Image: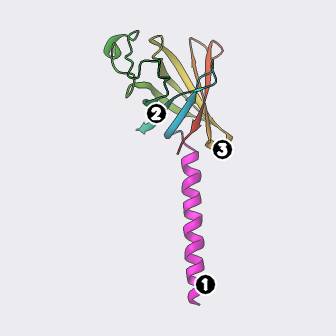
Amino acid sequence: MRISVKASLLAAALALSSAAAWADDASPVGLWKNIDDVSGKPKALIRITESNGVLQGKLEKLFRTPEQEQNPKCGKCEGANKDQPILGLMFMWGLKKDGDEYNGGEILDPDNGKVYRSKMQLVEGGKKLQVRGYFGVPMLGRSQTWIRQE
């Protein structure tokens, strides 16, 4: 009888842990590696967090070549972000769940200082995130694929 209780407890623990892992993959909250849509190379690690149902993203790590500035600033940004370090910059904000997408937010491109409307959607069971920045309508923009790191 003791073995079956242990086996039952183990099975319950495994079921709960796999349910928790599934729940994490059902949300964009976590650490992501973005892949540049032009070069196809990793560009940064981004931490997406959620507060009161609204998502925001902060740059945690930049993948730079030795020739590039290792601690670049957002020289082309405007307002409070002007000349702020890109590392640690809150560059994505205001995204809310809308069906199977997250939209209604904005995303800052630190390379050009422009702010775009943004939307995103989890794909491949939550392992990847399709992120789109655009002007006006989603057809006028760029997309990147981000890969979950946790």
Q: Nearer the viewer, mark 2 or mark 3?
A: 3
Q: Is residue 5 magenta?
A: yes
**Residue type, mark 3 in image:** Gly
User: Which comes sooner in the sequence, label 2 or label 3?
Assistant: 2
Q: Which mark is residue 4?
A: 1
Residue at 62% from the left image edge and 20% from the top image edge: 39
Determine the main secondary structure of the stretch shown in magenta: helix
Q: Nearer the viewer, residue 72 or 95?
A: 72
Tell me the distance, in whole angstroms, between the alpha carbons under discs 2 and 1: 44 Å
The stretch of residues the image draws in magenta is 1-27
Q: Which mark is residue 55?
A: 2
The picture places residue 85, in percent across and down from the top left corner, at: 35, 21
Tell me the distance, in whole angstroms, between the alpha carbons under discs 3 and 1: 33 Å
**Residue type, mark 2 in image:** Leu
Left or right placement of residue 98 versus residue 56 in this view: right
Q: Nearer the viewer, residue 97 or 130?
A: 130
Left or right placement of residue 148 versus residue 89 in this view: right
